[in-house]
Amino acid sequence: MNVLYDHQCFTGLTYGGVSRYFFDLMSSFSSRSDIDFELSLRLSNNEYLSKASFSKHLPYRQLAHSRNVNRAASLFNRLYSQQRIKAGQFDVFHPTYYHRYFLKSINKKPFVVTFHDATSERYGKIYPDVGEGLYEVKKQLMHRANRIISVSEFSKQEIVRFFPIDPDKISVIHLGTTFQNNAQHEVAPSAEFPYLLYVGKRGLYKNFTTFFRAVRPVFKQHPNLHLICAGGGSFTADEQALFHSAQLGSRVHYRPITDESLFGLYHHATAFVFPSLNEGFGIPVLEAFSASCPVILSNRSSLPEVAADAAVYFDPEDDDSIANAVEQVLSSNARQQELRQKGTERLTHFSCEQTARQTLTVYQSLL
């Protein structure tokens, strides 16, 4: 069997959950003898692919921050993908995002679409930056696709809620992570203070501002406690003003990340807090489990499905609920240790190998 993946999620993005998903999938397939694949990509600065033997792309790091250069790279990659699709030397096509450029060229070849979340459908009118206007594209792709992969039961229900799609067309395949491989690297020394860890983007539905407002009283009760925000871009002027107005400017820190440095941040944190209003799966939860980090989560979307009883939950729109959940973990070493143990056990339910095996079964069902 030969599968063709296209360029979409690897163009113009250095990191990202979608590109990580496809990178892990192809990495798992690269060690199997029952599947061959091709990634139709010529130009990329994606860090996951930087050492991948299965990708023959050219990097353009010195020009990576130019919007016009990224647009040109995207167009070039799309033309190349179009060429590989027309060549037809594959059994199944799996586009890596929601562009429909290939629909006129694919003829009768089967294709699979992965649906990650319905954030744009839920929040597109409130936060247009999350992708308002993608609805018709998603609907057409899922209607035309031979099979839809959903990354969680929650996301499957979102498909059925927002789109006229037969549920029987959808296969739920949970994600995995190889993040625990970073434990083989030397873990950086712990910070000189106890800290809560927040990871990733902070704007829009990620709900960071509400979380910070809610935990201000907790920081007053724990004068040695700090907050580290890993990745997601440097603090904005508005964020810095927010921290200083709460008199916590010296206790909130930004850290740029690599996988290795992020593992250390999880490992030494008192707890990881994820206040998001909407996640299709929530890979940071598995990352925290991998690094033996206690987890405190929003009770929304897919997060309870992923973490089960290995987390403390809160209502992400209720300040008291957020503060109480954080305080419950901070004030009990026994609770922290219990969460570490439960997280380690919960992680055994997820693996990239399992994701790849179940995905291959979907591909095979189309032949």
Image: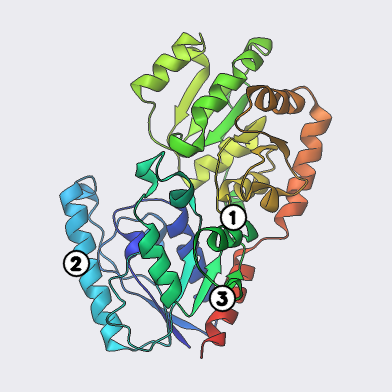
Element assignment for label 1: helix
Quick one: which residue is furthest to the right in this view? Answer: 334
Q: Residues within 10 Å of mark 1 (few under 14, many from 20)?
A: few
Quick one: which residue is furthest to the front in this view? Answer: 164
The image shows residue 220 at horizontal and vertical percentages of: 63, 10
- Mark 1 is on which residue type? Asn
Which of pointers 1 and 2 indicates the residue nearer the eye?
A: 2
- Mark 2 is on which residue type? Phe
Q: Residue under label 1, please give it.
A: 181
Mark number displayed over residue 76 = 2
Q: Residue at x 57, y 27 (%)?
A: 211
Q: Residues within 10 Å of mark 2 (few under 14, many from 20)?
A: some
Q: Residue under label 3, please give it.
A: 169
- Mark 3 is on which residue type? Lys
Q: Nearer the viewer, residue 250 or 9?
A: 9
Q: Earlier in the sequence, mark 1 or mark 3?
A: 3
Q: CA distance from mark 1 to mark 3?
A: 34 Å
Element assignment for label 2: helix
Q: Earlier in the sequence, mark 1 or mark 2?
A: 2
Image quadrant of residue 268?
A: top right
Element assignment for label 3: helix
Q: Residue at x 48, y 88 (%)?
A: 1
Is residue 176 visible in the rendered image? The answer is no
Q: Residue at x 65, y 38 (%)?
A: 297
